Amino acid sequence: MADVKLNDRLQAYGSEVAKIVRAVSDATDEVFTELPHRRWKEATKNIYGETQEALDVWTNQIFLKRMQETGCVKAYISEELGEPWINPDDTGGYTVTIDPLDGSSNIESNNCFGTIVGIHKEKDLLAEGRKQVLAFYNLYGPITTLVTADGKHACEYVKHRKGSSDYWLWKEGLKLSDPGKLMGLGGSPNKWTPAVKDFVDYMTTLKLKVRYGGAFVGDINQILFYGGCFMYPEMTDKPQGKLRLVIECNPMAYIISTAGGYASNGVSAILDAKPKEYDERTPVYIGSTSVVRKFEEIRAKYK
Ligand code: AHG
Ligand code: MN
Ligand code: MN
């Protein structure tokens, strides 16, 4: 494959979307350099009542400032802000949803984490995930990668290849294998509902291997490359599960669906769910279509 830079490919989406992606991708060196230092917890909590890691707050500030500077963002919906930032100049054609640092609990244990972004241009800030125009995530693992999806093509870019500070295209036209190889099992097994337990038994018959990394961004990346299903499911004490519909599940559902997979809330496609609140949670079963669809079938028998 001829050497293609991220910025070359971004031009296809127009200068505004390209600037929005670059607001994050151009900051990854600054973020990566900060990772070894900013490892304390703040005294503050986010809207979910979760103690904020210093990196949560800091990365949100970095990305918000860069998004404001693009002049293309009319609203910035972030896990770390109580209410969205709304552009006072009423300029900018796009709404950005962002989890500035996904996998905060992995900071302490030096496991992977990253940034999840969704972009749409609907009048309604709480638009269904299917209306996104682009979704992407940055993954800080042993190397820094960036995966984008536009509804037709899912691509992976790698930072610092060939010694340059650019992101270079590594894989394009990513497609999930089905049924794939992995199952990522979130939540506490003693809280899984009977339907979820039956689903795990089913996935076991498929000989899927368990892989769970504690960061949605890393767990999704494994499913993207190896196929199978990740779930953070309904639980007896938390029927809505843990993950957030708008800032985590919609962008990832868009990416996995672009790669030929499927994301469900247990009943229907996450991408068709109409968000009512910025901070609402949803159960999520995401990955190879045949496997995820099987959970909907199993769950329907219990309702
Ligand atoms: P965040 O760090 O943005 O709050 O997200 C953490 C989420 C998600 O990344 C991951 O799949 C899940 O929480 C892990 O939850 P547990 O710690 O309960 O495993
Ligand atoms: Mn997250
Ligand atoms: Mn987060």
Image (spheres, rainbow, N blue to C red):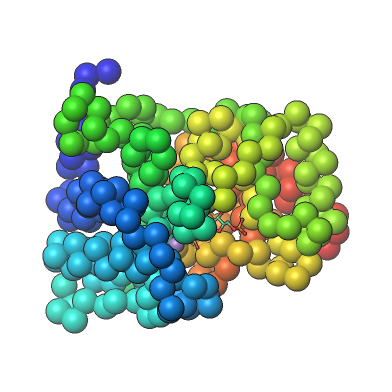
**Residue 276 seen:** no
| Left or right: 7 in relation to 56 | left
Residue 84 left/right relative to 224: left
> Is 174 located above or below residue 186 in the figure?
above
Percent of width and height locating residue 175: 49, 30
Horizontal placement of 207 versus 98: left or right? right
Closer to the camera in the image, 262 or 57:
57
Q: On the rendered image, what quadrant is the C terminus found in?
A: bottom right
Q: Residue, x 30% and y 33% (percent of image)?
A: 158
> Who's the residue at 24% across and 63% down the image?
62
Residue at left offset 81%, top offset 32%: 205
Q: Quadrant of residue 166?
A: top left
Q: Name the spot of residue 49 as percent of width and height, x first.
A: 53, 77
Task: Locate the N terminus by quadrant.
Answer: top left
Quadrant location of residue 193? bottom right
Q: Position of residue 216 (x, y in %)?
A: 52, 51
Q: Quick one: 300 or 101, which is closer to the camera?
A: 101
Q: Please name the residue shown 64% across and 60% down the image.
A: 283
Task: Classify 1 as above or below 95.
Answer: above
Picture quadrant of residue 204? top right
Q: Nearer the viewer, residue 240 or 263?
A: 240
Residue 280 percent coordinates (x, y): 54, 72
Q: 58 or 229, which lies in front?
A: 58
Q: Quadrant of ligand 3?
A: bottom left
Can residue 204 be seen? Answer: yes
- Badge count: 0
